[in-house]
Amino acid sequence: MGKIVIEPLSRLEGHGKVTITLDENGRPKDVKLHITALRGFEQFVVGRPAEEVPRIVPRICGICQTAHHLASVKAVDAAWGVEIPEPAKKLRELMHIGNMIHSHALHFYFLAAPDFVLGPDADPAIRNIVGVIDKAPEVAKQAIALRKYGQKIVEAVGGKAIHPVTGIPGGQAKRLTEEERDKILKDADQMIEYAKNGVELIKQLNEQHMDKIKTLGVIDTYYLGLVKDGKHNFYDDTLRFLSPDGKEKVDFKPSEYLDYIGEHVVPYNYVKHPYYKKVGYPDGIYRVGPLAMLNVCDAMETPLAEEYRKEFFDIFGFPANQSLAYNHARLIELVAACEKAKMLLEDNDITSDDIKAEVEPRAGNGVGVVDAPRGVLIHNYETDENGIVVKANMIVATTHNVPTMEKAIQQAAQEIFK
């Protein structure tokens, strides 16, 4: 018997390692994915005034900090029983969409694209974003433009491009001026075109690498995503589980998440293994993120993204279970985000000054959910009569995926060692 240890994992927004235990014939006997960073934010926020927490939790992640900010402030709103004005909801959603544009462009073009554009067998010294810039400079320019556009939206709505601060209990602290709106809106159509180019690019790259896409990391799991009236939605408002065969859909409110999601403790990880309670662990492990979001929804909310979604399932089948199809799904979501940004920017409510409802700290329990760039993000706080957080639970998007990432690595290891 022997052991292979892969550490550190590269192209990862975080810290982790993989250990592969080999049997006497040199074949994988056991594979473990270890998440090696301890966050501790559930304890950091206990004892703090709840209105401070949306400014603390973005530090969980430098990439999806906007999602943490918004899930957090939604949880405080729910705990204190406040209904925010409609223009404030739209501003928050626009801020979230900006982060999705920035992060999805980053994730594909900077982390995934080098393996596709340069090829998985290319020299690692050039198989990176610098290599992409050298081989496909126009692709790189569009990626940078998309990221910049997303950050421009977050900064205009959230006050800062990184770690936004304008989401407050009861609504938003800052309105969007017509001048700010017009500056962003003038680039919207160009960004939609760049996002469409991304989908066309991944379709070409998929054709070159389809043998790997349809063999590596292919696993059947449950899927969890966010829908609104059955349609794909990054910000609101119903959680949905889909069975591995695609035949069963179960919808539930974010406030009911503890009735549907369990967390199994494993001794080799700082994160727990979430699972669908109805099925149990480990059969009930599930995936979140772009692949899951496309699988669980009945349709996309925007027209171009919907056409791409239909085409996606023509290629991969329904539900799509290929881990490498996440890249294609992510770029479809990028189109959806650019389309939705334009819709929100053209809505007159987006520059309204009716953005704050009266709110008083009180004892309560609230849940806030958004679909972060890596998938479903859950924040749950309990406050005392003074509005101080006495208990917190957070299930970060990547945490949902850890057990299924491990299972996909196991499958890939078996395939490669053949």
Image: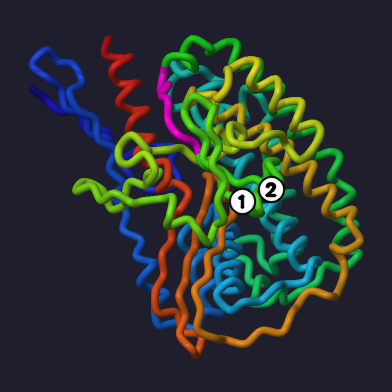
Magenta stretch, main secondary structure class:
loop
> Alpha-carbon neighbours of circle 2 within 10 Å: few (<14), some, or many (≥20)?
some
Contact, CB < 8 Å: mark 1 with mark 2? yes
As displayed, is residue 372 above or below residue 202? below
As displayed, is residue 210 above or below residue 166? above
Question: What is the x, y in percent for residue 40?
Answer: 34, 65
Q: Give the range drawn in magenta.
A: 216-223
Q: Name the residue under label 1.
A: 238
- For the residues labelled 1 and 2, the Cα–Cα distance comes to 6 Å
Compared across the picture, whether 264 is left or right of 341 comes to left
Q: Quadrant of the N terminus?
A: top left
Question: What is the x, y in percent for residue 320?
Answer: 54, 24
> Alpha-carbon neighbours of circle 1 within 10 Å: few (<14), some, or many (≥20)?
many
* Residue 43 picture quarter: bottom left
Looking at numbered disc 2 in the image, what kind of residue is underneath it? Lys
Question: What is the x, y in percent for residue 296?
Answer: 59, 36
Name the mark on residue 228: 2
Compared across the picture, whether 114 is left or right of 204 comes to left
As displayed, is residue 44 above or below residue 13? below
Instruction: Check disc 1 and report its element: helix, strand or loop.
Output: strand
Q: Residue at x 16, y 27 (%)?
A: 21
Instruction: Check disc 2 and report its element: helix, strand or loop.
Output: strand
Q: Which residue is drawn at 32% across and 14% down?
A: 415
Please tell me which of labels 1 and 2 falls first in the chain: 2
